[in-house]
Image (cartoon, rainbow, N blue to C red):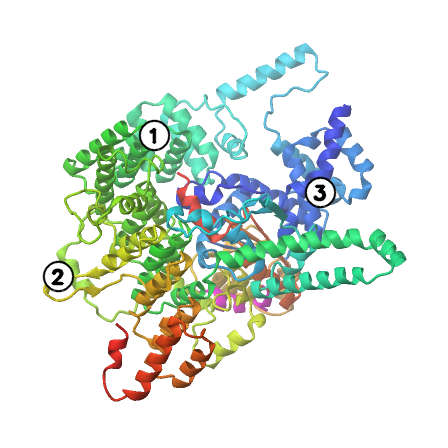
Amino acid sequence: MELPNLYECLYLQGDSSPLPAVAQSLRLLQMICGPPAVILSFGSHSAQLLQMLQALGKLPESSNPPDYGGWLIIDRDKDYPSSLLTPAIYAGLLLEVFQQRAGEIVVDNSKNKISSQRVELLQSKQSSKGASSKPISVRLNSASDEIYGDNRYKHFAQASSWIRAQVKALGLELQKLNDMQLEEMHDYVARKLPKLTELKAKVLRHLNASEIVIQMLGNFRRLQALEEDILNNVSRKRLLGDIDELLTTDGQRYNTLRLLCLLHHCAGVAPEELQTFARNYCNMFGHRELGVFQQLAQAGLLPQLLPEKKAPTKLLANLPLPKFQQTEFQANANRLKLLTSCGDGPDGAASSKEVQSCPSFVFNGTYIPLVAQLCSILLRANTAEELSTKLAMIEGMQLHLDSNRQTTPKAYAAQQKTQPPGPAAAASSGADADVFPLRLRNLFVFVVGGANYAEIAACDFISKLTGAHITVASDSLMAGSDLIAAAFSN
Amino acid sequence: MDVQFDSESYWNRSSRAAFSFDDEDEVDIVSTELPSNKWENNGIFSDDTISEASFENSPALNHLSIKAILSEEALKLVLQEQNLDERVIHKGVSPDEELKLLRRQIQSTLYSPDLDATAQKLLQGKTAPLEMFRSLHEKQQLLDTLLSNGGGHAVVTVLLFLKRTLNAAQFYAILKQRPKALEQYLSYLRESGDVSSHIDLLQRFGRHQEAALKQFQAALASEDAPSRKQHLQRLVDAYANAGVGIVPLYEQVFHAALKMQLLMEREGTAGKQLGDQPTPIELLYVCCQQNNNWKEQDMLKPIAPQRFAADQQISPAQYEWTALNERAQAQAYADLECIFERVPTWHPLKSKQFHISFDLTLAVLRLYELHAPSTVLQLFLSKMGNSGEKLALAQKVKCIKAVIDAMVGLKQQQELKQLRETLPERSEEQFYCENALKSLQSKRWTTDNIKLKL
């Protein structure tokens, strides 16, 4: 179901023509896996998808029992931060640094996704040494690469130290070889050595990859701190200055822009501020990139530039009056408790200590991907009402039940309430009984417009916590820079 | 048949490799199911005998039979839906019957405009005849039905049909009333590369900002420099007099691009070593390379770095960073002072001041990366206010004199003594360290130790 340009079409150009193809694939999946008891959709494209599913006609009765208790379909633009933030897990960082194609990444010492984003002239030329090494490709597939399978959702620091330990262990193993008797050695070579060399090749590949990642993300701490401040909206002015400085001294075509997008999404950027940034950006990367800002504004990642000069009456609004403003993101994030690091009290400190106890570990404990949070809410809701109290305040959420009815979580809860409890009701409404708690504890998640590894890892974590199976699917796998890069393609 | 069969078994074997699904799926059952789902999309199994055979021959591959996951009825429905051309006539039909069938098909296409059926077909991605929608009303209805169902590529199909059969005014009126359809049509034009009608349509619907951007991109995309210049000139003139408000940023960039184009034309040597279209920063870098008087830059020369930066509205930070990199690469460290020293404008008689527009730490680190000598590093480090940070940074870039300075600033006598032991005998650094120690011990109550730093 890979559709490479879906994000670009849907969000940047407002063109919904690829949606029917997605709807057809989902319909096939429904035929195979059986229709779920409940579908939760979030966002306009998701709602449209479900509408199309219905327009395509009724499904024939499936002979098999359904595989999934619930589906969750969500628009990418409802949760930009999980794409824009830099993930802290191994698979996510691999995807940040290396170009991925058909489930494979190419590890090349001389060039990668990050170095190709920089202006070459301003780089210190020191990487001319390993020119002879051939690019290697690593398959991101747990079935064919057990090292990747074991480590993909671990924190990068953990994963890379594990790999290093593995290398040391291999070295010891080879030393043992030197001390062996001849017959022993013969036996060893025949039985163990092929396996060992294969393992060694794999480990070395990963070692190489992780070393390049470290090298490329040299100032990861600083970036992380900056991102955390952006999320929690700490001193906007300084953040803008920092982003500008990053652009000047370590300008990366996509990643710097990505930070600004994150800032706009979380705290809002004024058109004038964008104007100065865009001017510097065009100086850095050429005048031809001017169109990018309009494209990203289309997707709501940046503010629209305004044609007229500011009217003098607006000066009043510019006075630094203390205003309490919340962006939509902050409101929703607070309602769903996505921001884990903002409480600077004792609980904030606790969360950083036991990183592994919360799905936010995928972003070093700063943010929980929306998808993961919704999954855990769905799985933990015991009644429709419980669900509605958690989701009621959020707009654009729709609940689709088995019988093609479409409601909001709140309306559904109200309806459940009005039904008189008792044996009569239960008898009359066999199908209308509350679908919560979900009887079948399997979830299928579909992200319209590209998922990322952080989300998948967080869902994996949730599924381990709750003992449910969560399958994450999407039209493509994108790192944050790919998301921004989509705006450059025309 | 044999060849086909081989390709079949190839598909079986490689299907797992071809799709990255296994990786995303936490549930193993699904990962085996999804590839088989994919096969149906390919339409390979529309011929029954082959598919059966290949399943029986490859039990080891752990593939489920298609019947186990999909009921007979559903399978038929899928095949019917995925079948793109419905006019295929089964074999073994007598010529008479075939004629009848064809007649019926033609009749149905020509005389009964079934709105819902057509919309449904189009939505499934099939071809459907549109000619029977004759009146304007019917055509609009068809479009609206599609749009309300979610549209897709079918919308563009219908729009192209409308464009063919309606006059321009009616066509644009229809687009105007349906913004969704307009978006789809615009994105179709963009994809098909029809730039001029794309721009035309944008302007017609009052979207001048986007139109201006498109024109600008088209101008930059022109192949040779003279025509690029011409296009840019025309663009700048057009928007200066047009009266439609355009985003000030766009105007600035248009002007800057034109200026740069003119400059490159006049100073042929400047852009030679770069690509066809260098970025302003790259050009600035070249300007820095060619500049040979850093003390007093000639602001009349357009390729003097400072003049160029002013012309292109390059921010001070960007200018300084570029110049720093270029000079350090060229190992002309003496010029660095000139870049960062300014006479304050409000008081021209005052001595020059050190001024830097970005974090000093970054400058020092970059200079270290570029193998600048320690005296240069010391110069930059001496401008840092916070002695603690200075010490850490100086140790990082191994600039011993700056380490000593920082320790003096922190009054760390003990550490200074330790440091002196590790320094090579009778080296310059050791003398420096001893002097620092002496000054720290003897003149603690005077302000003389400030002089040492100079």
Looking at the rendering, the stretch of residues picked out in magenta corresponds to A379-393
B255 sits left or right of A125 in the view: left
Dot 3 lies on which element?
A: loop
Judge depth for marks 2 and 1 and give the one in front: 2
Residue A436 visible in the snapshot: no
Mark 3, residue position = B70
Marks 3,2: beta carbons within 8 A? no
The mark lying in front, picked from 3 and 2, is 2
Q: Which residue is denoted by mark 1 in the rendering?
A: B195
Left or right of B19? Residue A385 is left
Q: Amino acid at mark 2?
A: Thr
| Mark 3 residue crowding within 10 angstroms, few (<14) / some (14–19) / many (20+) | many
Host chain of mark 3: B
Relative depth, front residue between B332 and A424? B332
Residue A248 percent coordinates (x, y): 33, 55
Badge 1 sits on which subunit?
B
Q: Is residue B403 left or right of residue A144?
A: left
On the question of residue A263 being in view, the answer is yes
Mark toward the start of the polypeptide (2 vs 1):
1
Q: Position of residue B274 (x, y in %)?
A: 35, 38
Q: Are marks 1 and 3 in contact (CB under 8 Å)?
A: no
Question: Could you tell me the amino acid type at mark 3?
Answer: Leu
- Please name the residue that numbered disc 2 is placed on: B345
Say what secondary structure mark 1 lies in.
helix
Distance CA(mark 1)–CA(mark 3): 47 Å
Name of the residue lying farthest toward the right: A183
Q: Nearer the viewer, residue A50 or A152?
A: A152
